[in-house]
Image (cartoon, rainbow, N blue to C red):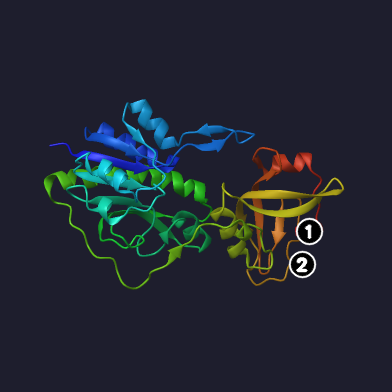
Amino acid sequence: MPLRVIFMGTPEFSVPTLRAIAEAGHDVAAVYTQPPRAAGRRGLELTPSPVQREAERLGIETRTPTSLRSEAEQAAFNALQADVAVVVAYGLLLPRAVLEAPRLGCINGHASLLPRWRGAAPIQRAIMAGDLESGMMVMRMEEGLDTGPVGLVEKCAIEPDMTAGDLHDRLMSVGASLMVEALARLERNTLAFATQAVDGVTYAKKIDKSETRVDWTRSASEVHNHIRGLSPFPGAWSEIGIGGRTERLKLLRSTLSEGLSPSEDLGESGGILDDRLTVACGAGAIRLVEVQRAGGSPAAASEFLRGAKIEKGMKFS
């Protein structure tokens, strides 16, 4: 028998899961999402979240409270008489009264291999740390931050040049299928939850703008992981002289430079080594593959070099 579901999510990452739950035939009683935010070039237009737009397309009631702590909001949530709440990147803390309201509790789709990378930015942090794999987990929610027991897991390899955007899109699809499977098992009462391991806990704190500037004194692998872990947003960056003035260049894709020893001394960190945007690091070098000038669009390095005179011996700072 289909379940009566409350869906709670906000960004594009959450949309495929909402769509998949609806297509699986479950009764989505309501969608909770973050309120519309100011957007547009002047920041004057209120723009609904991607989840709100999808819910409206599906004809599902949408609620956008700024908090769930009031008795009135909790009573309204409880009145939906849901079997389960599904949470994917919602963005608001769920008080105990909300967690306990659905008959089968609240389950969360989380983009990491818990207990590694609990918190706000698991995809970016996994790549920045050089992890070789990530995945999606369906867990039962409790009051702690991503501490609940896990019901389903699907792992995903992190390829050497994969960016946070690439992994985001892969896990977005994986998460939708995994959540539909979790709901099917809930229907059959066959979804078993296992307590998370005590060892190996790490926290994926929100990315701060102060972290985004590239430190070329770090090793090539560290710089490469930093670039791809912050791509496409907020984007790692560095400065270089172009046409007689210093420009900030967003670095979107890179690869480790072939044929260079990680311990080889290539000269000053940040120095341009050739005409292919190979850049010296504290140890080894990377080659920039995709960049973006301020106010411009992402461009392949070869395209960028046709419009910017970057020569061997110049230096990123």
Three-letter residue code for mark 1:
Lys
Q: Is residue 112 left or right of residue 184?
A: right
Asked whether residue 178 is in view, the answer is no
**Real-space Cα separation, disc 2 to disc 1, in angstroms:** 8 Å
Q: Is residue 263 left or right of residue 70?
A: right
Q: Which residue is mark 2?
A: 268
Asked whether residue 30 is in view, the answer is yes
Residue 84 x %, y %: 22, 45
SS at badge 2: loop
Which numbered disc flags the more N-terminal residue, 2 or 1? 2
Between 84 and 34, which is closer to the camera in this rendering? 34
Between 219 and 152, which is closer to the camera in this rendering? 152
Q: Which residue is mark 1?
A: 315
Three-letter residue code for mark 2:
Glu
Residue 74 x %, y %: 28, 46
Q: Which mark is residue 3?
A: none
Q: Is residue 245 left or right of residue 8?
A: right
Q: Is residue 314 left or right of residue 189?
A: right
Residue 245 x %, y %: 84, 48
Instruction: Answer with the quarter of the image where residue 58 lies.
Output: top left
Cβ atoms at labels 2 and 1 below 8 Å apart: yes
| Crowd around label 1: few <14 · some 14–19 · many ≥20 (10 Å) | some
* Residue at the spot 18% in from the left edge and 49% down from the top edge: 104
SS at badge 1: loop
Between 68 and 3, which is closer to the camera in this rendering? 68
Instruction: Answer with the quarter of the image where residue 312 lies.
Output: bottom right
Residue 152 x %, y %: 26, 54
